[in-house]
Amino acid sequence: MKTQAVVLRTIRYGEADRVLHLYTQDRGRVSAMAKGVRRTKTRFGGRLEPFFRLDMVLYEGRSDLLTVTSAETVDAHARLRTDARALDAAARACDAVSRLFETAEPHPAVYHLLCNELALIDRDPAVATRANQLAFRLKLLLAAGLAPQLAACASCGAREHLTGFSGAAGGVVCTACEANAFPLGQDAHRFMAEALGRPLAEAPSADERALRQAERAIADIAEHHAHTRLRIASPRQ
C-alpha cells in the first residue's frame, strides 16, 4: 500500500524494532512495524519519528500490523522540535487525532487538518497557543460529525437565553433546559463559533475563563459522543 502519513507516536519493540502509530491520507489510523529502525545503521535514517510527514509504502500481511518497506520525507517539521511549546502542542494535536479517529477509515479532511496544524506550528512556534489547540479540536469534532450546536438550544431549539452547555445534548442550552448543563459565558460561546468559522491560521483569541469553558465543552462532547477523553490543552496562552 502506498500512502502519505503522519507519524503520531512510536513504541519500542524488541531490541531494534519500533511500532509506529500513523495517520494516513488513504486509510485513516493504522499501526506499522519498522524493523531494525533502532540500529545505528538503518535505511530509514531518523525519519520514522513523531510529527514527520512521509510518503510510505506499507506491506499488508495477515496481521493487522503493517510493515514499513519504504519511507521518504515530505516534511520533517524540524523547527517545532527546537521549541518546547511547539513540541508539546504538536504532541497534543496528534494525540487528539489518535483518540477521536481510532479506526482504519479514510478521513482525508482530518489528515489535511493535522498536516495544516503541524505546518502552522512549525512555521511559527508562537502559534502554539491554547486557543489554537482548542480551535484545532473543534475542527476535529466538526470532521467527526460532532460539532457542537451553537446557534440554538440543543434541547428545545430556542435561540435566546443560551446560558449553558450540555455535552449530552450536544451543544448550548437555554435557561429552561440547563438542568444538567454547566454555565457557558458569551465570550466562550463566541470563541467556539468563531473558531469553527475561521481558518485554523486565524484562530480567535479569548481570555482564560472563556478558554476553560470552551475546553470543558469540547471535552464533554468528546466524552459523551466519541466515548473518549482528550488530554487537557497546554495552559500556555
Image (cartoon, helix red, strand yellow):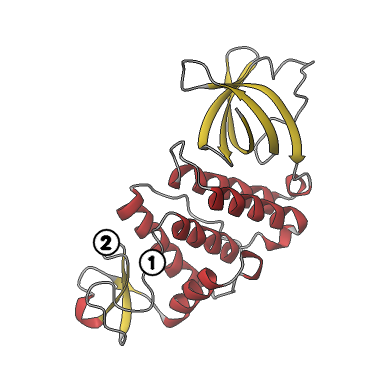
The residue that appears at 66% across and 41% down in the rendered structure is 51
Give the residue at mark 1: 148
How far is disc 2 from disc 1 in space, using C-alphas?
Answer: 10 Å
- Residue 170, image x and y in percent? 31, 65
Q: What residue type is labelled 2?
A: Ala
Name the residue at 47% across, 56% down: 143
Task: Return the residue found at the far top.
Answer: 15
From this view, report whether residue 181 is shown above or below residue 233. Answer: below
Q: What residue type is labelled 1?
A: Pro
Quarter containing the C terminus: bottom right
Q: Residue at x 66, y 55 (%)?
A: 116
> Callout 2: few (<14), some (14-19), or many (20+) C-alpha neighbours within 10 Å?
some
Q: Where is residue 110 in the image (x, y as percent from the top left)?
A: 54, 51
From this view, report whether residue 196 is shown above or below residue 158.
Answer: above
Kind of element beneath mark 2: loop
Q: Mark 2 points at which residue?
A: 168
Q: Is residue 102 above or below residue 143?
A: above
Q: Residues within 10 Å of mark 1 (few under 14, many from 20)?
A: many
Query: x and y percent of residue 197 in the render?
Result: 53, 72
Q: Which quarter of the picture shows residue 66?
A: top right
Q: Extreme bottom residue here?
A: 160
Q: State left or right for residue 79 relative to residue 108.
A: right
Q: Find residue 38 and report its horizontal and vertical position in percent.
A: 70, 19
